[in-house]
Amino acid sequence: MSTQKSRIEVSRASKAQYDEILTPEALNFTEEFECKFGSRLIELLQCRVKFQREIGAQAYTDGS
């Protein structure tokens, strides 16, 4: 895992345990994961949305 500082910036107000959860290591992992798999993740999520729409449309036509 990289030891460089993450480019991810947390912009919401900090809550009690954010510093324990959003460690530099966790942010680096998230950044590396997104760089490696981000485009594939977006592709899969788009397929899921399309599939959900097809299921919804089918539910309306099958129930008639």
Image (cartoon, helix red, strand yellow):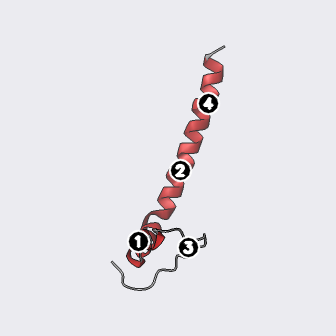
Front residue of 10 and 36: 10
Task: Name the residue carrying label 4.
Answer: 56
Label 1 vs 2, first from the N-terminus:
1
Kindly check if marks 3 and 4 are in contact, taking CB atoms under 8 A apart as contact: no
Which amino acid type is shown beneath numbered disc 1? Answer: Glu
Q: Residue drawn at (62%, 16%), measured in percent from left and top?
A: 63
In this view, the residue farthest toward the front is 16
Q: Estimate the spatial distance between the alpha carbons at disc 4 and disc 1, rounded to whole Å.
A: 41 Å
User: Helix, strand or loop at disc 2?
Assistant: helix
Q: Nearer the viewer, mark 1 or mark 2?
A: 1
Tell me if 15 is positioned left or right of 60 in this view.
left
Q: Residues within 10 Å of mark 1 (few under 14, many from 20)?
A: few
How many numbered discs?
4
In this view, the residue farthest toward the left is 1
Q: Estimate the spatial distance between the alpha carbons at disc 1 and disc 2, rounded to whole Å.
A: 29 Å
Which image quarter is the C terminus in? top right
Q: Estimate the spatial distance between the alpha carbons at disc 1 and disc 3, rounded to whole Å.
A: 13 Å
Q: Residue drawn at (50%, 51%), measured in percent from left and top?
A: 44
Label 3 vs 2, first from the N-terminus:
3
Kindly check if marks 2 and 4 are in contact, taking CB atoms under 8 A apart as contact: no
Residue 49 position within the rendered picture, expressed as x and y whole percent measured from the top left = 58, 44
Label 2 vs 4, first from the N-terminus:
2
Circle on res. 43? none
Task: Name the residue carrying label 2.
Answer: 45
